Amino acid sequence: MADLDYEGFWKETLIQLRNDLGEEEFSGWFSDMKYLRTRFDEQTGKNGIVIGVPSAFHRDKVKSRYQNTINSKIMLLSGAEIALEYEITGKIAKNETTTPQLFQNDGEKTADTSQESPKPKKKRDKHTQMRDDYTFDSYVIGENNNFAANAALAISKNPGKTYNPCLFFGGVGLGKTHLMQAIGNYIHENSDNKVIYVTSEDFLNEYLDGIAQGKMNVFKNKFRYTDVLLIDDIQFFQDKPGVQEELFHTFNALVNAKKQLVFTCDRPPSELKKFSERLISRFEQALKTDLQPPRYDERCAILKKTAEIKNTLIPNEVIDLISKNISSNIRDLIAALNTLIAYTELMGKPVTLEIAQQRLKDTFNASRQANFSMDNIIRVVSEYFSLTPNDLKGKKRTQNIVFARQLAMFIGKEMTDYSTTEIGQDFGGKDHTTVMHSIEKIKGKLLTDPTLDSTIENLKRLIKEFSAKY
Ligand code: ADP
Ligand code: MG
């Protein structure tokens, strides 16, 4: 029971009491009380919270006036009966009051400073869960990510107030994690707010550990009592109902307490499969913003920024060469530049166009859209929409089948060199005018549906991955 800790519940109780009672009454009684520890009583088998009070008089007054309210709040928050015990600690110094500011000093207990003069505020250590180079300074803002980046900046300056909750979505390597951690790093550096960053996989593992070890309260206390919770790649929760349920409650607890929530996902929430409806609808109501693949000039800007950070001089024609050859994924774009920098550093030569052409030949070839079979495209698209290849090849006119079919034709035209006649053949012998009509339909939808572009990028990525395997 060593890591049992109900401090979060206590702090939340105080927040609610302050709301209920008003500042004056609240501070009259509660600002002189201090959370001391959580205690497990062997005899009764119950957990208790030990609170420090200045005097026996204070204790008795609080007990007679507020005990019932406090008990019911704690019960509601923790779902368990938690006994409240009081310890007389004398009057506490002003700077250690329990004014409900969650987790001052990054969740560590405040040291007893009552005997010492106040120290100047110490700069916080780096956040251990995030990369310190994922900041706004190193993030290039262009038309492709303008809206998302501005939302991220607004969140950083006012967590919990604007754009809460927020969801960034888009295909792999488009900067979701970087942007999310830029928010986390900014808040961590510029405020006392507690920031948690987790991948969905880690969230799941901690949840499973919590269940296996009978310590769900530790899990809940951690994730429900933070100021900022960043959860990366929520598509990972597909088909995992238990953790989805837990996420739903975490979501509600934090939003109700006006704490900031940020999620990333590789697709629009409406396309999450095997996901609880009520969670999807929560995500739908969040501020959703997608990250698009960067255009040529944005790719150049990202490469220049990367070179600048690495303090390396890269000629413009090399920037141009890489930007022209790698278009769909920023991770690949930067990796190509890094390969080149590493090579030239090793050889002690400057980066030139010739070296770049020679060293990156294979990389460019691999990223080119080559040899995608219509069969693979049909398979991936039908799977994505929970349909079968025969649905797409057949004649059924159900709305979702028609849409998936049109999309597969559109992507087929983009990813292969096949003519509309050949594509029609692969869709169960349809006429080329049908294919042309489908392509036009999708082009029209692209103008009105802001999420379609990222769905297409996502499908293309899945098709590439699938084609690499088969
Ligand atoms: P995702 O999470 O969407 O898969 P990442 O955030 O991991 O993508 O980004 C992949 C790489 O591209 C990282 O190295 C990241 O720093 C870089 N990157 C992405 N977007 C930008 C940007 N706008 N400016 C600078 N670097 C970027
Ligand atoms: Mg990521």
Image (cartoon, rainbow, N blue to C red):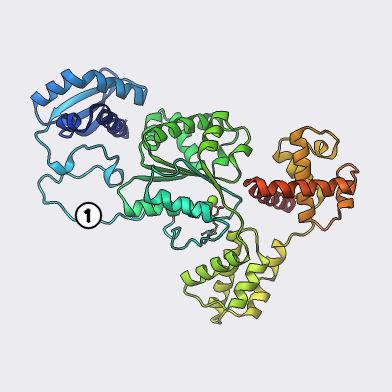
Of all residues shown, which one is farthest toward the bottom?
349
Q: Is residue 72 above or below residue 383?
A: above
Q: Name the residue rendered at 61%, 50% in the picture.
A: 171
Name the quarter where the N terminus is drawn.
Answer: top left
Q: Nearer the viewer, residue 117 or 165?
A: 165
For label 1, the SS is loop
Looking at the rendered structure, the kind of residue marked 1 is Lys
Residue 25 lies, in percent from the top left, at 18, 29
Q: Is residue 454 above or below residue 140?
A: above
* Left or right of residue 424, residue 275 in this image: left
Residue annotated with mark 1:
121
* Left or right of residue 419, residue 295 in this image: left
Asked if the beta carbon under badge 1 is closer than 8 A to the nearest atom of ligand 1, the reply is no
Q: Nearer the viewer, residue 59 or 452?
A: 452
The total number of labels drawn is 1
Q: Quadrant of residue 38?
A: top left
Residue 183 lies, in percent from the top left, at 42, 52
Residue 109 lies, in percent from the top left, at 24, 42
Q: Name the residue rendered at 58%, 57% in the picture.
A: 144
* Left or right of residue 246, residue 272 in this image: right
Q: Can residue 72 be seen from the camera position used here?
A: yes
* Left or right of residue 365, residue 268 in this image: left
Q: Name the residue rendered at 35%, 55% in the picture.
A: 126
Q: Nearer the viewer, residue 329 or 140?
A: 140
Residue 400 lies, in percent from the top left, at 74, 35
Q: Can residue 42 be seen from the camera position used here?
A: no
Q: Name the residue rendered at 37%, 30% in the picture.
A: 217
Graded by Cα atoms within 10 Å as few (under 14), some (14 to 19) or many (20 or more), the crowding at tag 1 reads few
